[in-house]
Amino acid sequence: MSESCSVPVVRKPTPNGIIRQATLDVMPLALATVPWGILCGSMAIQIGLTVLQAQLMSLLVFAGAAQLAALTLMGAGSAISSIYSSTFVISSRHLLYSAVFREHILKYRFGLRTVLAFLLTDEMFALTCAYIEKHKVFSAMYAFVTGLVFYLVWNIATFTGIYLGQQLPDLSEYGLEFAIAATFIAIVIPSIKSKATLCSVFVSGGSALMLTVFESEYTLVVATIIGMVSGFVLFTEKNNG
């Protein structure tokens, strides 16, 4: 008597399937940042930027945290050097993101690499890493679609903020900045899959709170480094033990 066994067939995702999956994956995170984008648009109008300048900031800069920091400093009349240094520090985490993706995108043409670099955000990075972990392969199309959808939603939110900023006196009173914290929490929590990662999260978060109390100028960078070192030490001790 013979037994037949069926071997599961692993189907390679089709381009349409990748586009659909990328859109569905990024949409919750994109919608979560809508209040954030509205706040950026309204703040740009309130500090005296024109409608075109305010929209171009999202179209060309496309960096939520850096945009808010720059707008706050511009509104306070800070020096150009302070604006550049602050936004550089805030955006420096993208150096780590690009280092992670480097081995995956070197084979693509410079034009595509440039586009992916422009669309690189915390959300796109987290989702693409999850895709790589699941499918064991990097998909330029998945990364591009997640980044593009997020870019479109962000700019629509900015335009909405620009309009509302002309109609309402001060949208910052509505607590829209909470969307920033909520978005990063939604990104970080699913990635906590080991004690080393959990340690990094708690240590960096605690360090950030302490440094904020002492009004440290480099809170973000220092807290990030402390968290990374603590997680690395725990990871190394576990593997060597």
Image: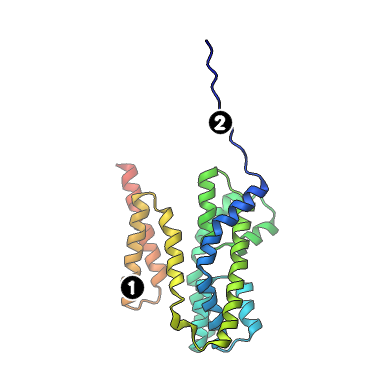
Picture coordinates of residue 156, whole percent (x, y)? 61, 72
Q: In the image, is residue 170 above or below residue 197?
A: below
Q: Residues within 10 Å of mark 1 (few under 14, many from 20)?
A: some
74 and 182: which is toward the camera: 182
Picture coordinates of residue 15, whole percent (x, y)? 67, 48
Q: Residue at x 63, y 86 (%)?
A: 50
Q: Quadrant of residue 188?
A: bottom left
Q: Nearer the viewer, mark 2 or mark 1?
A: 2
> How much space separates mark 2 and mark 1, taking CA atoms?
53 Å
Picture coordinates of residue 141, whole percent (x, y)? 64, 52
Type of amino acid at the residue the image marks with label 1: Leu
Numbered marks: total? 2
Residue highlighted by disc 1: 211
Q: Residue at x 63, y 78 (%)?
A: 55
Q: In the image, is residue 239 above or below residue 114?
A: above
72 and 148: which is toward the camera: 148
Q: Is residue 98 visible?
A: no
Q: Is residue 121 visible?
A: yes
Q: Quadrant of residue 215?
A: bottom left
Image quarter hosting the C terminus:
top left
Q: In the image, is residue 134 above or below residue 85?
A: above
Check residue 8 in the rendering and tell me which mark sits there, or answer none.
2
Q: Residue at x 54, y 13 (%)?
A: 2
Q: Earlier in the sequence, mark 2 or mark 1?
A: 2
SS at badge 1: helix
Type of amino acid at the residue the image marks with label 2: Pro
Q: Residue at x 38, y 68 (%)?
A: 222
Q: Are marks 2 and 1 in contact (CB under 8 Å)?
A: no
Q: Residues within 10 Å of mark 2 (few under 14, many from 20)?
A: few
SS at badge 2: loop
**What is the basis of the colouring in this image?**
rainbow
What residue occupies the far top of the structure in this picture?
1
